[in-house]
Amino acid sequence: MWWLAVPVVIGVGKLIYEVMTDESAAQPTPVPDTALVNNLRALRELTRKPDPRRVAFLGQPGAGKSTIVSKLSNGRARPAPVIGVNTDATNWAKYTGVDLLCRWERREAADVPGYDTSAHPVSAFVQHFPFENFGKICLVVHGKVHAADVAIYEAIRRHGIAPIVVRSRAESVDAPDRETVRNDLCRQFSGLAPSSVVFVSSRTGEGIKELRGRL
Ligand SMILES: Nc1nc2c(ncn2[C@@H]2O[C@H](COP(=O)(O)OP(=O)(O)OP(=O)(O)O)[C@@H](O)[C@H]2O)c(=O)[nH]1
Ligand SMILES: [Mg+2]
């Protein structure tokens, strides 16, 4: 008679599995309260009062965000952006109370640490970054577009903001290849207008003036 219990056990197991997978599909796994999450909450507080001149720079580690902020401000952004070849040159994951915004003239900018590392997982930014508190958002990419870039792009769009996609290290993209790169970006970032792509080279200075004019 023991075999009569087999279908019951399988049925109960299936039910438990379905309930558990349904729940995890419906809700993203909450990101634990790390220093990074607490810094992102602090950023939300700091930016609560709307300011159209507030801009955020997001992108992979080493994409060139800090260099762009430095060039845009002609070196006047304070605190000065940390430029480095190492990943996590800008780090919000070690301590709370770090500088989250820098300023020059009447502009305020968040030079955000590169996402998609173990210290700065992209899920923390998707769930906690206060996208809606920024007048403009630049998504800085160089080379290959990763799934994390698409996740951030979509999070920005969900908040009703059309990001400016900045293709950094433009000096390495020859003029005849520009349209191909632009079209590739528009294909990978659904809904991105070709006019929202700006080629910038912090090495040659190309595109800095154009980007400044868009912010
Ligand atoms: N050739 C070239 N190098 C660049 C350009 N922009 C930045 N770099 C170099 O790339 C490296 C990383 O630049 P950062 O500005 O620190 O990059 P980031 O995106 O702020 O990096 P994280 O803060 O770690 O996320 C530095 O060595 C820069 O000198 C560029 O347009 N061309
Ligand atoms: Mg940086």
Image (cartoon, helix red, strand yellow):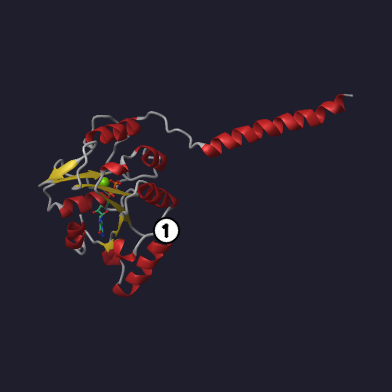
Front-most of residues 84 and 54: 54
User: Tag 1's secondary structure?
Assistant: loop
Looking at the image, is 161 positioned above or below residue 7?
below
Front-most of residues 22 and 81: 22
Whether the residue under disc 1 has CB within 8 Å of ligand 1 = no
Residue 209, percent from left and from top: 16, 61
Residue farthest to the right, as pictured: 1
Residue sitting at 26 percent across and 35 percent down? 43
Quarter of the image for residue 180 reads bottom left
Residue sitting at 86 percent across and 28 percent down? 3
Residue 171, percent from left and from top: 26, 66
Residue 64, percent from left and from top: 27, 53
| Residue 122 relative to residue 50: left or right | right
Q: Which residue is mark 1?
A: 190
Looking at the image, is 206 positioned above or below residue 70?
below
Front-most of residues 161 and 29: 161
Amino acid type for the residue under numbered disc 1:
Ser
User: How many badges with numbers are in the image?
Assistant: 1
Residue sitting at 39 percent across and 38 percent down? 127
| Residue 136 relative to residue 144: left or right | left
Residue 195, percent from left and from top: 30, 65
